[in-house]
Image (cartoon, helix red, strand yellow):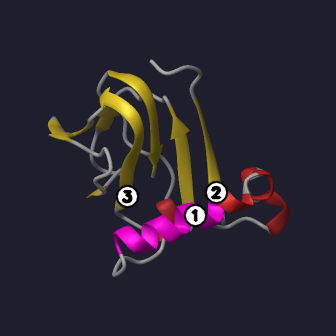
Amino acid sequence: NGGASGSFSVGAMPGTRGCDQPKANAAFPDLMKAAFELERALMPGREPSSTIAVNRNAQFRPHTDSGAGAGQSTSLIVGLGTYTGGELMVEGEKKDIRYRPVEFNGWTQRHWTLPFVGERYSLV
């Protein structure tokens, strides 16, 4: 793959006070602003997310998301980068997310990342 992997979140964590907000808000304010602007550009009619997870070269095993999702039932994901493969599997259905936003219910639908080569980012 394209190097080290990692994940962090930006935005407003539901049900927490200001001091408990993601550290990445202060570390990457321009990225936070750009991520939420991208969401609005991709899905203008969608209820805005409170939090966006930023994943680099992360390959997730089959899972469902934990937590309440800030009351949202639908996740939005888009893949960015110079990679091949890395599709999102949702309940066994392959979804190409590279520069193509996909909505799914991460709390009820099992999902995972297929193997990939290159540098892959996803915003969820």
Q: Amino acid at mark 1?
A: Ala
Is 34 part of what is drawn in magenta? yes
Q: Which residue is mark 3?
A: 75
Q: Nearer the viewer, mark 1 or mark 3?
A: 1
Q: Position of residue 77 (x, y in %)?
A: 37, 52
Residue at 47% x, 65% y is 38
- Count of numbered marks: 3
- Please tell me whether the stretch drawn in magenta is mainly helix, strand or loop: helix
Q: Amino acid at mark 3?
A: Ser
59 displayed left or right of 36:
left
Q: Which residues are magenta?
A: 32-43
CA gap, disc 3 and disc 2: 19 Å
Q: Nearer the viewer, mark 3 or mark 2?
A: 2
Q: Position of residue 44 (x, y in %)?
A: 37, 79
- Looking at marks 3 and 2 on the same chain, the residue that comes earlier in the sequence is marked by 2
Q: What kind of element bears circle 1?
A: helix
